[in-house]
Each structure stands twice: as C-alpha cells, then as structure tokens.
C-alpha cells in the first residue's frame, strides 16, 4: 500500500526506460494488433517469467517484449499508458529513456519510434501539465560504430532529444568503448548520462564521469566501494538516479533492507528515486519510494530531500526547477501544520 503522502508528493522521474513500462496486458494487445505470436500463453505466464537472477536474465526477456512495438500508434499507446501512471503518482516532470536500436535493428524506422513517444509526451504536457524530456540510450552490448550510426540518425531530432545515455549489459562493456560517440554527441550539444556501477565496478563510474563527461550517473550504487569516488560525487553534486526495486529484483542487493540508498543520501550524495522498468520490477515511482521507506525506515525529511533532489538533478532550466521546488515546499508545509 502506498501512503497518501508519497503518492501525492510532487516528484520528478529521471530514470525510466519507456520500453520497461510495457505491461503484460498491453504487450498482448499490441501482439494481437500486429499479429505477433508471443512465447507466452497468458498474462499470468508472462508475469511468472519475470523471475530474474541478474541484469542479463532481465534484458533477454525485456528485448523480447519490445518486439510487439511496431507502429507509431504502439509507441504512442505505450507512452500514454506510462503518462497515466505517472500522473496518478503526481510525477510533475519525467525524463524518459528510449532504446532506438532495439527497434531500428528490427526494421522499425527511427522516426516511427520518436514520433509516437514525442506526441504522447506533448499531449501529456498540454492535458496534465506534465513536463518531459527524451534521452536516447545506446545499447552498450552493440558496437561503437552502431552507436555512432544511431547518433547520426538522431541529429534531425536535436530539438526534442535532450541527452544521450548508455544502457544494456554493463559488465565487459565499459564507458570507454563509447568515448568517440559521446565526444560527438556533446559537440552536437546533447547532454550525457550513463548507466554505471549497477553491476559494473566503480571504475566504470569514473570513466563515465571523466571520459563521457556525464551530468548524472544512472544507478551508481557501487560507488560505495571507492571512498575517493564517493567524495567526488559529494563535492561535485553529481546526481545518482537510483532504482530500488530494480536493484533488488536484479540481485544487486539481496534485499531492500540491504540497499545503500539511505546511506548514500545521508553521506550527502544527490540521490534520487526512480522506477527503471516498472512493468518488470513490481512498481512505479511511488512504489519505489514506499518500498525504500518501509525497509530503510526513511524519515519524512529524507523523503522530501529525495523529491527535492529529483527536481535539482533534472534537465529543466533553473526557473522551472525553482517553480517545482516551490510546489514541493507548499505541499510539505501544508502537511506539517
Ligand atoms: N535497460 C533497461 N533497464 C536497464 C537496466 N536496469 N540496466 C541496464 N540497461 C537497462
Ligand atoms: Zn536503467
């Protein structure tokens, strides 16, 4: 059960893969729409298969699920369903990841993927006042040349894609593999982020910072193993987009009680809470706040700090950040009387 304070808390989401919001019900609907045979008999069979032992075991199923996404309308419907969830949990701003290569490699044009997602986000802004940004992620298990080709495909969409990122199988695919691609992306005025220190070692966080010059680290929970790195993240206030339910489902931590989110927050790192792949990991952003709060006994002021960090760490301009932080302040003031 999500408590009302968490559900209604104004917050930003900075780490959510739009393909990871594909609920089994929509997966079946799109499979039927596009005449695709799924390797599952029923929705409950799909849910039963979501039993992961590490990142790769999840990715194998996740990439399989994306195959039902074929037409612009499918990408619109996927994004719109996420928007409904986000609005119901008072997400005020969202920065969503998209993995174009998992679609273009199947022959789906980049434009189809982009336009469906972008239109739904535009409609969300006009109907609900939900602001958003799109972040294009390169699949790190594929080559740097393939990433560069994808970056070139994205150049006509510079106005609607704020940043590039790096996701997929971390171990054995260090950030330095993509130095030239990220150099080019920054030269083209994209901001940069990268998944690092989820399963990979602290050295991957260092190379994401130093070589890819990222503004944020996605996950980053293994920073704890390197004191110099922790000091650096604090000093530079480099945000971590932490995803508690994901980390437990993928066995980065054995249980939520063992998660280091509270510890990192109290050390002074700009930690944020996010859902990663909510359809696969058992909850959207509010469920992530709630699970972390319950297991780690987070105080109300720690919860508020996490929400404030989410606005500070976003790619909004300072005026928009201040307006949302003001909204958060009014919300919390009204509830502490
Ligand atoms: N793609 C989707 N979710 C991911 C995660 N948690 N880590 C790496 N790549 C991903
Ligand atoms: Zn992720």
Image: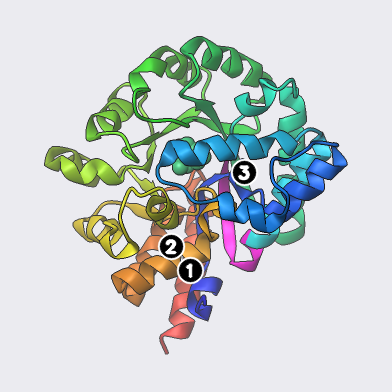
Residue lying farthest to the top in this orientation: 145
Query: Label 2: which residue?
Result: 307
Q: Are marks 2 and 3 in contact (CB under 8 Å)?
A: no
In this rendering, which labeled residue sits more in front, label 1 or label 2? Answer: 2
Percent from the top left, x then y, of residue 230? Answer: 19, 44
Q: CA distance from mark 1 to mark 2?
A: 8 Å
Using the image, determine if residue 13 lies above or below residue 37: below
Q: Earlier in the sequence, mark 2 or mark 3?
A: 3
Query: Label 1: which residue?
Result: 328
Q: Name the mark on residue 18.
A: 3
Percent from the top left, x then y, of residue 58? Answer: 50, 42
Membership of 97 in magenta stretch:
yes
**Label 2 residue SS:** helix
Using the image, determine if residue 153 lies above or below residue 76: above
**Label 1 residue SS:** helix
Q: Which residues are magenta?
A: 86-98
Magenta stretch, main secondary structure class = strand
Q: Earlier in the sequence, mark 1 or mark 2?
A: 2
């Amino acid at each position: 059960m999500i408590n009302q304070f968490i559900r209604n808390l104004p917050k930003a989401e900075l780490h959510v893969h739009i393909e990871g919001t594909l609920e089994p019900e929509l997966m079946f609907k799109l499979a039927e729409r596009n005449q695709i045979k799924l390797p599952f008999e029923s929705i409950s069979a799909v849910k039963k298969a979501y039993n992961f032992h590490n990142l790769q075991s999840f990715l194998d199923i996740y990439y399989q699920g994306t195959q039902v996404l074929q037409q612009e309308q499918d990408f619109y419907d996927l994004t719109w369903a996420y928007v409904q969830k986000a609005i119901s949990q008072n997400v005020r701003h969202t920065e969503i990841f998209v993995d174009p290569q998992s679609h273009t490699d199947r022959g789906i044009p980049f434009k189809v993927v982009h336009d469906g997602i972008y239109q739904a986000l535009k409609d969300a802004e006009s109907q609900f006042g939900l602001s958003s940004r799109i972040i294009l992620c390169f699949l790190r298990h594929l080559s740097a040349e393939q990433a560069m080709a994808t970056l070139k495909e994205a150049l006509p969409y510079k106005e609607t894609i704020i940043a590039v990122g790096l996701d997929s199988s971390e171990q054995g695919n260090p950030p330095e593999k993509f130095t030239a691609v990220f150099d080019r992306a920054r030269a083209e005025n994209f901001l940069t982020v990268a998944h690092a220190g989820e399963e990979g070692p602290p050295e991957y966080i260092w190379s994401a910072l130093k070589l890819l010059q990222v503004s944020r680290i996605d996950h980053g929970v293994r920073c704890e193993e390197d004191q110099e790195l922790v000091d650096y993240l604090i000093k530079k206030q480099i945000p971590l987009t932490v995803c508690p339910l994901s980390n437990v489902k993928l066995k980065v931590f054995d249980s939520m009680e063992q998660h280091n989110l509270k510890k990192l927050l109290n050390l002074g790192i700009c930690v944020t809470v996010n859902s990663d792949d909510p359809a696969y990991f058992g909850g959207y952003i509010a469920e992530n706040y709630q699970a972390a709060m319950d297991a780690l006994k987070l105080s109300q002021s720690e919860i508020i700090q996490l929400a404030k960090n989410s606005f500070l760490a976003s790619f909004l301009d300072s005026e928009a950040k201040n307006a949302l932080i003001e909204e958060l302040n009014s919300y919390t003031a009204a509830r502490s009387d």
